[in-house]
Image (spheres, rainbow, N blue to C red):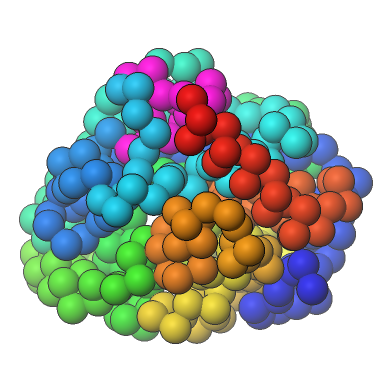
Amino acid sequence: MDILYINEKEKAARLLEEARHSSIFWSFFIGSTLTSTIPGISIAGPDPEGTLLTPTLDVEYLELGKPRTVPVIPVTPEGLPTPAIITRAMMRKKQLPHLIINAGAHAEPLVPHVSLPSRIIANPVNSGKALPLSNARGLLEESRQLARNIGETADIHALGESIPGGTTTALAILEGLGYDAYGKVSSASPNNPHELKIKLVKEGLSKCGSANIDEVLACIGDPVHIAMAGYLIGALESDRKIILAGGTQMTAVAAIAKALGAEFDGNAIIATTAWVAMDKSSDIASISKQIGIPVAASNISFSDSPYPGLRKFDEGYVKEGVGAGGSLLITHLLTGLGMKDLAKLVYDEYSYLTST
């Protein structure tokens, strides 16, 4: 079974079946939050400070096969590769038009991209002053307008992200909007630091002075989730269908859009990996059911990989990011290749990386 349906199977299956015969456009959002520099929060980089460069390096590698800003592939402290390795392998097999959107990266990527005028690096989530209200509102409207402008380029728009510390800010957004999310967001580590995440989020939320959505986002949000939500709204307004390619962070994107009046009606789904869907330290099914958005997962495994670094994915490391799960599902649908064959494409990409 190549596809796992986590909830609302009929709606998810219908949209994915439509994707087999549709034009698809990718948008990859990058941004930074200083939340990722808090020790113990993120392993999406060689060390806490190094996480700030990861989004830039991810999209440079995705585009060029090697980063330009720093000539090093993004890795965890244990040396495990970025999930962008999956997305790049899929894009090499089935090239699709795509756009990189900078919502507030620590370093401007040295590849063609669009920078949103209100882009900003977010302060730590526990500060209660993540970003100015004007930036939060600006990111929403600018990305909404961008989606309207390019909506007709494809029937389906797939959205991916790279923002270390993003599951923590996603948790804050979900709780700030009234959802039961404590202990339910995922992590790139097999040892999900729930206690630390909850502590930081509660500190941040205690400093929020209003339940108004714009002010909540300014208080505890981050540029990527806000910008993606704006794009989601704009694309839906343009009668496009949306694949939110990511893990529990995508529930925060959907939650923001819903709070601002978006109705999904089977026109938007979350597409993730089996590593997220089956993760016992998180619960994407519970959060997505609360919001009312379907979830499907690529039933991928690297257990037979000749490379220990990839086998670690099956042990709870990395799991998702840079559109990995969605890229696997889309490539499966467009090429007919099963997950075992797609896994071999990732092994080939990893072999190339380790030999250069």
Residue 233, placed above or below residue 145:
below
The total of numbered circles placed on residues is 0
Residue in the foreground of this view, choosing between 314 and 306: 306
- Rendered residue at 68%/68% (across/down): 299
What residue lies at 38% left-to-right and 18% top-to-bottom? 68
**Residue 219: within the magenta?**
no
Q: Residue at x 59, y 67 (%)?
A: 303
Is 231 placed left or right of 115 in the picture?
right
Q: Is residue 62 in the magenta section? A: yes
> Is residue 254 at all visible to an observer of this figure?
no
97 to the left or right of 165: right
Nearer to the camera, 60 or 347: 347
Indicate left or right for 55 with 87 as reference: left
What residue lies at 49% left-to-right and 48% top-to-bottom? 83
Q: Position of residue 245 (x, y in %)?
A: 58, 53
Residue 199 coordinates in the image, percent (x, y): 13, 74
Q: Quarter-wise, where is residue 70 in the image?
A: top left
Observer-nearest of 286 and 340: 340
Boundaries of the magenta span: 54-69
Residue 67 against residue 34 in the figure, above or below:
above
User: Horizontal and vertical percent for residue 92?
Assistant: 70, 32
Camera sees residue 53? yes
Quadrant for the N terminus in the image = bottom right
Main SS, magenta residues: helix
The percent coordinates of residue 44 (x first, y second) are: 32, 50
